[in-house]
Image: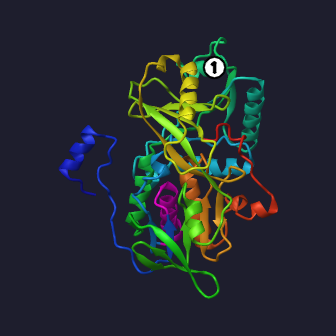
Amino acid sequence: MRFSFLALLRQAFHPDVPWTRQWRDPEPKSAYDAVIVGGGGHGLATAFYLASQHGLTNIAVLEKGWIGGGNTGRNTTIIRSNYLFPESAALYDHSLKLFEGLSQALNYNVMFSPRGVLMLAHNHHDIISLKRHVYANRLSGIDNQYISAKAAKAFCPPLNISPRIRYPVLGAALQRRGGVARHDAVAWGFARAADALGVDIIQNCEVTGLMRDAGGAVRGIETTRGAISTPKVGVVAAGHSSVVLERFGLRMPLESFPLQALVSEPVKPIVPCVVMSNTIHAYISQSDKGELVIGAGTDQYVSYSQQGGQHVTAQTLEAICELFPQFGRMRMLRNWGGIVDVTPDRSPIIGKTPIEGLFVNCGWGTGGFKATPGSGHVFAHTMATGAPHPINAPFGLERFASGRLIDEAAAAAVAH
């Protein structure tokens, strides 16, 4: 791959800006073996694994905006697998294991940093809940341990464990394998690797409808850049899957909420890990650029706003400044609201739909980024074979008819 001197110079002074697009920008063909709707991390990962694991290279990824411009570019980069239920733990740990070798697999540095994820306990209920998580994770073969407040302070020195604060730290659960990765690098890495295998990545191409044959099966899609024939369509449009699928005549058990987060001005390294708290609903880590990455919760109303209610951010900052009083004088650099699709049981939907040839991967809520490679891997298997991978089999749409839900609403701690 050749880079211009200007691109190299720009990278030297602005390391947060990728070198160049690094993939082709083709016109859409009239026909593909499969089409992925959504050019975020999950969609690009699906395309990469379809090509690399299943030999399907005549496929296209369609994105109505630009690659990685949706939720992939609006998240707080946290990676962990310490979920409570066995189904969720297996899915997220599968993804964490893929993250550990992802830079090598893509030949692109995704800046995965297993710096540890620390989940704080502030009361007796928190202690019981976190210990339950630890025991459940150990039964599933996933690393997690409960530590004292002093041990938490030793692992994260800036943490305030004074007994006089409003929510004193009584202990914590620690997953040492957890950490962070560079979110846009994940999208760019999958895009470049998929492109090298022959996948067409088509930006500024919005899907407007579904074409079906006389038997009701998929025969193609309609887009703003013309009709495309294909027997398989996978919808992976985080935050807007319900909108796309409604255009296809399907109503999904999804609601869309703004999920708020922010970053501070950059400072020298001070937060060595990810710190999360369910009771005060806040979490914090530090990016490689030095920004403090601070996350809050979803708004209490259904909306596609990328701003959300300001009180959510204010309450989160109050909590963070209690846990880390030295940050009280820092300035906020920017804040945003990503749009997340949420299912009634706060677990994703990965599998087939009632329409033959139409597959869906949605409903991740606040847990999507950490699942990116694992989600793409199992969804590619489902699309290629027509049958679910054993890991995503429990997450089919049919569970809402049978009542076999995977209720990670409270079990996922702050669910990020």
Coloured how?
A: rainbow
Left or right position of 352 against 270: right
Residue 219 drawn at (x, y percent)? 54, 82
**Segment tinted magenta in the rendering:** 38-56
Q: Residue at x 44, y 43 (%)?
A: 182
Where is residue 120, by image quadrant? top right
Q: Which residue is mark 1?
A: 151
Q: Residue at x 67, y 35 (%)?
A: 144
Residue 210 covered by magenta stretch: no
Q: Residue at x 50, y 60 (%)?
A: 43
Residue 34 drawn at (x, y percent)? 51, 74
Query: Which amino acid, mark 1?
Result: Ala
Q: Is residue 379 above or below residue 90?
A: below
Q: Is residue 283 above or below residue 163?
A: below
Q: Residue at x 62, y 81 (%)?
A: 217
Question: How many tags in the picture?
Answer: 1
Q: Nearer the viewer, residue 291 or 280?
A: 280
Residue 80 drawn at (x, y percent)? 60, 41
Check the picture and name the quadrant holding the C terminus.
top right
Q: Nearer the viewer, residue 217 or 13?
A: 217
Q: Residue furthest bottom?
A: 214
Residue 380 drawn at (x, y percent)? 56, 65
